[in-house]
Image: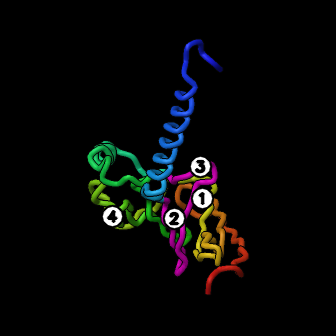
Amino acid sequence: MQIHGSYPGITRLTQRLLLAMLCLIAAGAAHATPALFDRYTDGEQTGQIFAEKCCYLDLPEDRRMRELRRQRLGSCSAAGAPVGVFRREQGKLWLTALAECGGEIPLETHYQGLQGPVVATWLSGTFKAYVGHCYTTAAQHKYAVTQVLVIEQGVVKSADEIHNDISDCKR
């Protein structure tokens, strides 16, 4: 589109400025803290767990937790923080700790009066856990096993395992 009296050089300059801005944005995104996901342990296997419908597992919410999240805003730039550290044991899903950029945080730090592992009674639905992490020779993430868990109020009602092909993982 040509505007009467405009200079053709301005269009070229605008294009160069836009390209420079896009490069800066891409460079900034490349150095961002990677997202945190809920951690999962089943015996000796470790990995990540996801709600079937979306991304993160719900954590118990209370006034103190909301206040602590506001206070920590900016101290951990990873999306999802804090996340849950869950363990499957004795037919139940347990919340054992929380995790942020700096590592694990005891439950009592966020939840006043809550000590040690607690059965995740607030969780019901279908969840997928990925365990047995490895890197392929092409530096891609893979998991040896996908567990499909049906959970009702923290109790594991069923668990199916899908064994994935990891033959291209580094040994």
Which residue in the structure is indicated by mark 2? 93
Mark 4 vs mark 3: in front: 4
Q: What is the spatial separation of the Cα atoms under label 1 and label 3, in whole angstroms?
A: 15 Å
Which residue in the structure is indicated by mark 4? 102
The residue carrying pointer 2 sits among few (fewer than 14), some (14 to 19) or many (20 or more) residues within 10 Å by Cα, namely: many
Quadrant including the N terminus: top right
Which residue in the structure is indicated by mark 3? 54
Q: Eyeballing the image, is 24 above or below 31?
A: above
Kind of residue at disc 3: Cys
Q: Which residues are magenta?
A: 37-57
Mark 3 vs mark 2: in front: 3
The residue carrying pointer 1 sits among few (fewer than 14), some (14 to 19) or many (20 or more) residues within 10 Å by Cα, namely: many
Q: Is residue 134 left or right of residue 34?
A: right
Q: Is residue 93 left or right of residue 32?
A: right
Sequence-wise first label, 4 or 1: 4
Sequence-wise first label, 4 or 3: 3
* Residue drawn at (49%, 37%) of the image: 17
Assess whether mark 2 and mark 1 are in contact (beta carbons under 8 angstroms): yes
Q: Position of residue 142 (x, y in %)?
A: 63, 71
Kind of residue at disc 4: Gly
Q: Position of residue 62 (x, y in %)?
A: 35, 45
Residue 129 picture quarter: bottom right
Q: What is the spatial separation of the Cα atoms under label 3 and label 2, in whole angstroms?
A: 18 Å
Sequence-wise first label, 4 or 2: 2
Q: What is the spatial separation of the Cα atoms under label 4 and label 1, in whole angstroms?
A: 30 Å
